[in-house]
């Protein structure tokens, strides 16, 4: 076999950020992602395998270290973990009915942070992002302009936008454009 | 009175709220003028003695400024910042002036004062309402070629800008507990009350500052302050509260379901040099738990002869121009009214030193304190009189008045006339919310009746006529406790008249305008009734009353009353037309906002896109995807490139980016069972590591999608779909899973974008990829055609498919998307010595057609069954159920005479058929010929040395060997019906 150096991950966008704006839009770090599907009775065993309690309420998340589970639907979670992650093996150990599909490369994460980050997201996302309706730690599958995203609030002024790879240029450009309005 | 000359000869020193030192220079039709900061274009023009500002839509009559607000029908102006930032039809009463503003009048040629089109006014007897429905019926062809273009050129308002708009527009979604629309006395009080509860409040007002009528009312006291001072103080208080957002220059223009209200905020239209980052407008899309409408009332004009002369305007407008802007609308101002509110304007003007020669009141013996006050100031009050006509052309110069009970007409010289027929509650947004209005017979007005949403109307728009009552009701509507707010004074919103005034009634032929913007007169409305229009909806469309951009804010009620009188019916029986969004015109920019240029629609690119681009490949749009079309080398046109690519794949190998193919991972113990139900093919017995081509039908039996499915494990399948079909196939599967087969333990995950797909096809394919692959035995025996293995390539994980859409032996290398480009480049480098050639979608199309492989959506059109497409083999013979199984049994799907997919060879091999061309059996039959089919795919095949085509032909499979004909503009092309496979008919190369 011919020696070929291991291919390095190449994102569709290499985002920088402009210092003028109060809100910065930056590329999130590489991540391991799993789309986890299961029925209610499998939740305890899967939670144990993941070492976190899978959330069961809409818009909620649970985290343990770098690993987080975002409630997406009644039988669906988006698991996001650091780049070096044992999450796939951990889930394989759970001998309950479930579906775990690696989508690490399907999504791209974009961080929106700074004062007014909620307004920047609201430039294209119709959700109520007030702290009472969308508190820190809340997450939801929703829309941004013309694309589908998963929105996750990491802090009062910090959001993570997850979208499919080929939509990331659009999402990034959209958020940049929206950030211009918030700075103005 | 003392005139300030700096900012216009009609500016009165010491009156109004603008600062005399803050002058602003602007131009109108090229004339240099000076106004004051805070002026609207209307107030600044009037300050400079200019009332003539435009020509009317149909008759080109001189027009002035009617109002001081967004209801303005006449004063439509063209504003130009630069060539690309030109805005026609801007209301002069809404546009604020800024240094350097360039305004131009519209609908006149060669100039505003001398307008050729005014000939229409002379010929107006020939242009009655609905003239275009009757006059230009003959000859038929002339409507399109002569009449319509001429009428369109003569009628109309501003000119559409010719260059793309360079302004930015923004958008914001917002939620709130209470949205208050209108920041007059009632709106401000409601916002205060709501804010005191801690609720999230949005208060918006279309004006540049809050106050509404408080900006011109001089007798109002609220909470111990003058009305205006209270408004300013309340604004400051609200602005200081964290839970309140106050938006001025913001119009609520659309009220939709579930309290979804659209607002447009004008951010930079009033600024001389807007900051570069500043959007021109911002669309607010607000979801409110509760909406409080405090939209006020709109004053109506009097309907009498020549009531459209410049200098004739609404009384409240004159009052605002005076009390806010310090501008007198004239030096000799007549008053014509049917209610009390115009008296207040007369009093203010008189007190400011303006001559008010007469107040003409249609009422016989009105009495009130305000009338007494006017009388005590020495104003001549003629009750029981009417203005029969206005004199002057480009500016009113006199009024002719007559007693109602007969008597002589006399003329009074004026240079302006202010008028009030009463007030129309602004129920526009209420009506948009699907609320039903109710007729208030006593006061002749429509008021909010039945509410359809969580919404409440307060103040003048609710028919609450007394200021204290309006504020009390506002405090309750806000839901909070702020203590009582004592209020005195204010406009009396009731009484007045609707319909035509004396002298413009039935049997008169005078031009008494009802709708200024569309040039509709009282007699036009009567004509509509005489012509048989009995419904207000018909009358509206026949006369165009209320159909202009102002949507009849001043005219609807007058038109309705005149129609009701002509029909001899009560007003509610004639009905009110529905109000629709937008309340006032909204720019396309605001509606489109961010969705321009790159953000118009997402452009999806594959992980290897940059490589294709670097190779100079043009791209083909497939849905939102960009796909490399072909890779031209120096001097090659598309034809040459495709021919070269096609031959290279069959002789050596080709590399193709198939990443856009849809991919769905089907996981769960019932996966095979689920696929059995979704596809025509059998899946239960497909071995792990094997693949199968599957066909998916709709319930009606027609082909919906196709693709190769690989079994990765007993409970895990890797499904591929067509590029364009990916989202709908996913939805189709999810729909059936959730609604028809919820008992199955199966989950679907879209993995389209998880995997970059690199197809390596051709006799050298194995040789090329073998050195890069780790952990997979690529031998024919270990990995035959239609199999899938998991392993590594270039050190990264891969799902390696042995499959083919070219007819050659080949692989589709799936790698996690971020590795796609690196692996592609490694494979390409590895393959170059073997003649590996990149090929695009065009070559892919040709190669698959050479093999008779169909493309769903090109060779099928939603009416093609598997049998029609020659795919009967793909239907599981022993299957008892799958989506479409019953559809396939329908009589018309199994009977003779169906169009079937066949191959076509032109008798002249050099001739390439046109896709979509129709096919006939006998080219000599008379036109229209009986068409028996059409060409679906057609290419030049370099590998076959001739043209090839696929076609859907009636009973095609029975016609093999038959000669058919394709009539084209340049002659008839003779073709032979053949099988669908043109190359390697036995399919031996697949196993190479």
Image (spheres, rainbow, N blue to C red):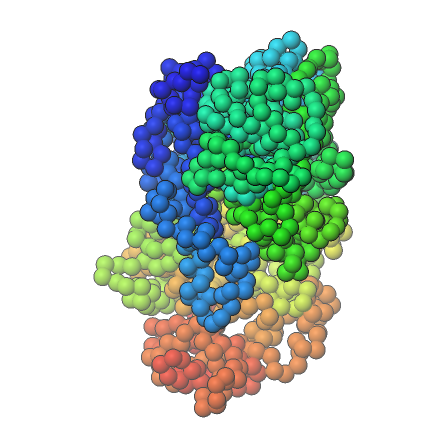
Image coordinates of residue B717 in percent, x first then y, are 60, 53
Q: Residue at x 56, y 78 (%)?
A: B900
Image coordinates of residue B363 in percent, x first then y, are 68, 33
Q: Residue at x 53, y 16 (%)?
A: B351
Q: Is residue B482 above or below residue B300?
A: above
State whether residue B477 appears in this view.
yes
Residue B683: quarter of image: bottom right
- In the rendered view, does A86 fall on the left or right side of A39? left
Image coordinates of residue B659 in percent, x first then y, are 46, 52
Q: Is residue B944 above or below residue A7?
A: below
Q: Residue at x 39, y 27 (%)?
A: B48
Closer to us: A9 or B897: B897
Closer to us: B547 or A126: B547
- Quarter occupied by the N terminus of chain B: top left
Q: How many marks?
A: 0
- In the rendered view, does B546 fall on the left or right side of B268? right
Q: Residue at x 60, y 79 (%)?
A: B898
Q: Is residue B285 above or below residue A158?
A: below
Outermost residue, top side: B224
């Amino acid at each position: 076999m011919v020696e070929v150096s291991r291919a390095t991950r190449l994102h569709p966008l290499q985002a920088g950020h402009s210092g003028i704006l109060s809100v910065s839009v930056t590329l999130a770090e590489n991540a391991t992602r799993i789309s986890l599907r299961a029925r209610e009775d499998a939740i305890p065993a899967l939670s144990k395998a993941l070492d976190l309690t899978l959330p069961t309420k809409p818009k909620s998340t649970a985290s343990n270290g770098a690993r987080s589970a975002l409630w997406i639907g009644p039988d669906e979670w988006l698991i996001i973990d650091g780049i070096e992650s044992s999450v796939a093996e951990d889930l394989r150990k759970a001998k309950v009915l479930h579906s775990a599909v690696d989508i690490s490369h399907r999504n791209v994460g974009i961080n929106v942070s700074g004062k007014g980050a909620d307004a920047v997201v609201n430039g294209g996302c119709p959700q109520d992002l007030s702290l009472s309706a969308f508190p820190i730690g809340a997450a939801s599958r929703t829309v941004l302009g013309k694309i589908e995203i998963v929105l996750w609030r990491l802090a009062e002024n910090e959001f993570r936008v997850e979208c499919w790879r080929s939509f990331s240029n659009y999402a990034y450009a959209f958020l940049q454009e929206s950030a211009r309005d918030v700075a103005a | 009175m003392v005139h300030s000359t700096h900012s216009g000869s009609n500016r009165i020193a010491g009156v109004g709220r603008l600062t005399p030192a803050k002058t602003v220079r602007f131009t109108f039709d090229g004339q240099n003028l000076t106004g004051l900061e805070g002026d609207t274009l209307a107030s600044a023009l009037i300050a400079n003695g200019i009332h003539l500002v435009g020509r009317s839509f149909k008759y080109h009559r001189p027009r002035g400024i009617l109002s001081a607000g967004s209801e303005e029908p006449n004063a439509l102006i063209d504003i130009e910042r630069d060539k690309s930032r030109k805005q026609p039809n801007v209301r002069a009463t809404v546009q604020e002036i800024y240094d350097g503003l360039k305004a131009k009048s519209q609908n006149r040629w060669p100039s505003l004062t001398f307008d050729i089109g005014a000939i229409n006014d002379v010929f107006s007897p020939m242009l009655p309402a609905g003239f275009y429905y009757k006059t230009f019926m003959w000859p038929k062809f002339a409507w399109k070629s002569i009449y319509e273009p001429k009428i369109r050129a003569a009628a109309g308002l501003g000119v559409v800008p010719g260059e793309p708009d360079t302004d930015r527009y923004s958008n914001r979604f917002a939620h709130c507990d209470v949205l208050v629309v209108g920041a007059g006395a009632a709106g401000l009080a409601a916002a205060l009350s709501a804010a005191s509860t801690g609720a999230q409040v949005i208060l918006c007002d279309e004006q540049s500052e809050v106050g509404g009528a408080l900006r011109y009312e001089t007798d109002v006291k609220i909470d111990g302050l003058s009305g205006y001072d209270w408004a300013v103080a309340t604004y400051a208080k609200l602005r200081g509260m964290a839970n309140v957002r106050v938006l001025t220059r913001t119009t609520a223009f659309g009220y939709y379901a579930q309290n979804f209200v659209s607002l447009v905020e004008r951010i930079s239209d009033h600024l001389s040099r807007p900051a570069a980052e500043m959007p021109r407008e911002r669309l607010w899309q607000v979801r409110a738990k509760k909406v409080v409408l405090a939209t006020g009332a709109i004053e109506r004009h009097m309907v009498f002869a020549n009531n459209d002369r410049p200098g004739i305007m609404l009384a409240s407008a004159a009052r605002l121009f005076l009390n806010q802007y310090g501008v007198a609308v004239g030096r000799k101002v007549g008053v014509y009214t049917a209610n009390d509110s115009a008296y207040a304007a007369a009093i203010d003007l008189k007190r400011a030193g303006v001559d008010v020669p007469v107040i003409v009141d249609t009422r016989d013996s009105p009495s009130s304190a305000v009338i007494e006050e006017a009388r005590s100031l020495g104003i001549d009050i003629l009750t029981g009189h009417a203005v029969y006509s206005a004199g002057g052309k480009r500016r009113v110069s006199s009024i002719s008045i007559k007693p109602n009970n007969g008597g002589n007409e006399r003329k009074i010289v004026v240079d302006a006339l202010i008028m009030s027929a009463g007030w129309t509650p602004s129920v526009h947004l209420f009506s948009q919310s699907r609320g039903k209005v109710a007729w208030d017979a006593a006061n002749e007005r429509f008021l909010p009746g039945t509410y359809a949403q969580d919404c409440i109307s307060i103040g003048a728009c609710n028919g609450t006529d007394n200021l204290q009552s309006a504020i009390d009701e506002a405090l309750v509507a806000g839901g909070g406790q702020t203590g009582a707010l004592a209020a005195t004074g204010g406009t009396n919103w009731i009484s007045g008249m609707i319909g035509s005034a004396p002298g413009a009634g039935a049997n008169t032929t005078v031009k008494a305008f009802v709708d200024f913007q569309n040039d509709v007169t009282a007699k036009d409305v009567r004509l509509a009734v005489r012509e048989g229009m009995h419904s207000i909806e018909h009358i509206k469309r026949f006369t165009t009353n209320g159909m202009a951009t102002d949507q009849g804010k001043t005219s609807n009620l007058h038109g309705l009353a005149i129609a009701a009188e002509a029909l001899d019916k009560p007003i509610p029986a004639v009905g009110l037309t529905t109000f629709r969004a937008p309340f006032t015109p909204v720019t396309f920019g605001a509606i489109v906002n961010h969705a321009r240029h790159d953000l118009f629609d997402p452009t999806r690119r594959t992980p290897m896109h940059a490589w294709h681009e670097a190779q100079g490949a043009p791209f083909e749009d497939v849905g939102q995807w960009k796909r490399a079309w072909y890779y031209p080398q120096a001097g090659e046109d598309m034809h040459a490139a495709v021919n070269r690519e096609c031959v290279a794949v069959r002789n050596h190998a080709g590399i193709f980016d198939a990443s856009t193919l849809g991919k769905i991972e089907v996981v769960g113990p019932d996966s095979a069972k689920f696929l059995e139900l979704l596809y025509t093919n059998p899946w239960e017995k497909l071995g792990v590591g094997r693949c199968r081509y599957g066909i998916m039908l709709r319930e009606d039996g027609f082909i919906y999608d196709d693709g190769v499915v690989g079994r990765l494990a007993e409970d895990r399948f890797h499904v591929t779909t067509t590029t364009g079909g990916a989202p709908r196939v996913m939805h189709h599967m999810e729909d059936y899973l959730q609604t028809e087969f919820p008992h199955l333990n199966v989950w679907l995950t879209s993995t389209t974008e998880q995997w970059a797909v690199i197809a390596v096809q051709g006799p050298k394919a194995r040789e090329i990829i073998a050195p890069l692959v780790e952990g997979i035995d690529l031998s024919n025996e270990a990995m035959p055609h239609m199999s899938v293995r998991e392993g590594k390539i270039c050190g990264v994980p891969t799902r390696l498919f042995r499959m083919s859409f070219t007819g050659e032996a080949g692989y589709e290398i799936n790698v996690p998307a971020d590795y796609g480009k690196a692996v592609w480049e490694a494979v390409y480098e590895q393959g170059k010595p073997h003649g590996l050639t990149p090929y695009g979608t065009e070559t892919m199309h040709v190669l698959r057609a050479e093999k008779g492989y169909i493309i769903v959506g090109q060779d099928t059109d939603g009416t093609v069954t598997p049998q029609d497409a020659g795919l009967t083999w793909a239907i599981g013979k022993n299957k008892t159920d799958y989506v479409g199984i019953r559809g396939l049994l329908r009589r018309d799907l199994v009977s003779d005479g169906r169009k079937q997919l066949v191959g076509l060879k032109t008798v002249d091999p050099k001739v390439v058929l046109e896709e979509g061309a129709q096919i006939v059996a006998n080219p000599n039959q008379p036109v229209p010929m009986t068409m028996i089919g059409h060409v679906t795919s057609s290419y030049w095949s370099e590998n076959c040395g001739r043209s090839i085509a696929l076609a859907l032909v009636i009973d095609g499979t029975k016609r093999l060997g038959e000669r058919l004909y394709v009539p084209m503009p340049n002659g008839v092309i003779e073709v032979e019906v053949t099988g669908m496979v043109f190359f390697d008919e036995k399919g031996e190369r697949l196993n190479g």
